[in-house]
Image (tube, rainbow, N blue to C red):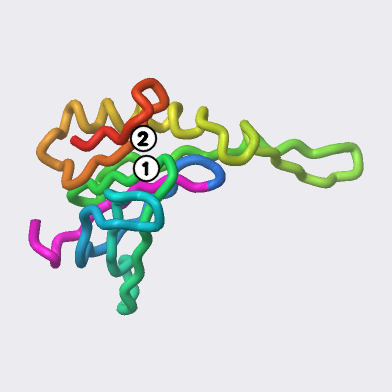
Amino acid sequence: MKKQDTVSIYFSGAFGVSKIEGKVLDFGFRKYAQYEKAPFVNYIKKGKRKAEGFIKGYKPYLVILDGVNTPSTQDPFTTPTINENGVTTKMSKFSSFDDRYILEFDEVLNEYIKNNPASVIMDCRFSEKTERINIF
């Protein structure tokens, strides 16, 4: 991978998985707090000039795929409803930080990776079953 290549970065947040498209400057693992190997990424968002980055500690979820024609993240909210006063409301499918958001998106992402294995640059997802980080 060249530093000029455009990638899709997936990471966990309060309402599941978020996606950023941009150019990766640096990625890998480094010591962070009590974690010996915490995944990190430094990047420039598409359409921006300033570099950004983050590091994931507890239950990391960081996937970097080559290209931008990758799966979109799923909407964490239900269909909007309109009450009798005309007020439109939306609510989240699950509570914040619920693992079901990630499990739901993993099905889509795993299918994409199965069909496009060469597009995976970094795949670092925590697994509840094994209580460890799976690095592919």
Q: Are marks 1 and 2 in contact (CB under 8 Å)?
A: yes
**In screen coordinates, is 121 left or right of 16?**
left
Question: Residue 23, percent across and down?
Answer: 23, 64
Quadrant for residue 5, please give it: bottom left
For the N terminus, the quadrant is bottom left
**In screen coordinates, is 55 left or right of 26?**
right
Give the amino acid type for the residue marked by disc 1 in the picture: Tyr
Residue matched to label 1: 61
Residue matched to label 2: 126
The first of marks 1 and 2 along the sequence is 1
Quadrant for residue 92, please give it: top right
For the C terminus, the quadrant is top left
Foreground: 29 or 13? 29
Residue at coordinates 28% horizontally, 59% vertically from top-left?
41
Quadrant for residue 135, please give it: top left
Question: Residue 12, percent across and down?
Answer: 44, 45
Q: What is the CA distance from the residue labelled 1 to the residue labelled 2?
A: 6 Å
- Which residues, given as a range, are shown in magenta? 1-13
Residue at coordinates 26% horizontally, 33% vertically from top-left?
134
Q: Which SS class for mark 2? A: strand
In the image, residue 15 sits, relative to residue 112, either above or below, namely below
Give the amino acid type for the residue marked by disc 2 in the picture: Phe
Predominant SS along the magenta part: strand
Q: Which SS class for mark 1? A: strand
Taking the view exactly as shown, the residue that stands out farthest to the top is 129
> Does 42 lie within the magenta span?
no
Question: Residue 99, percent across and down?
Answer: 51, 31
**In screen coordinates, is 60 left or right of 31?**
right
Q: Residues within 10 Å of mark 2 (few under 14, many from 20)?
A: some
In the image, residue 92 sits, relative to residue 46, either above or below, namely above
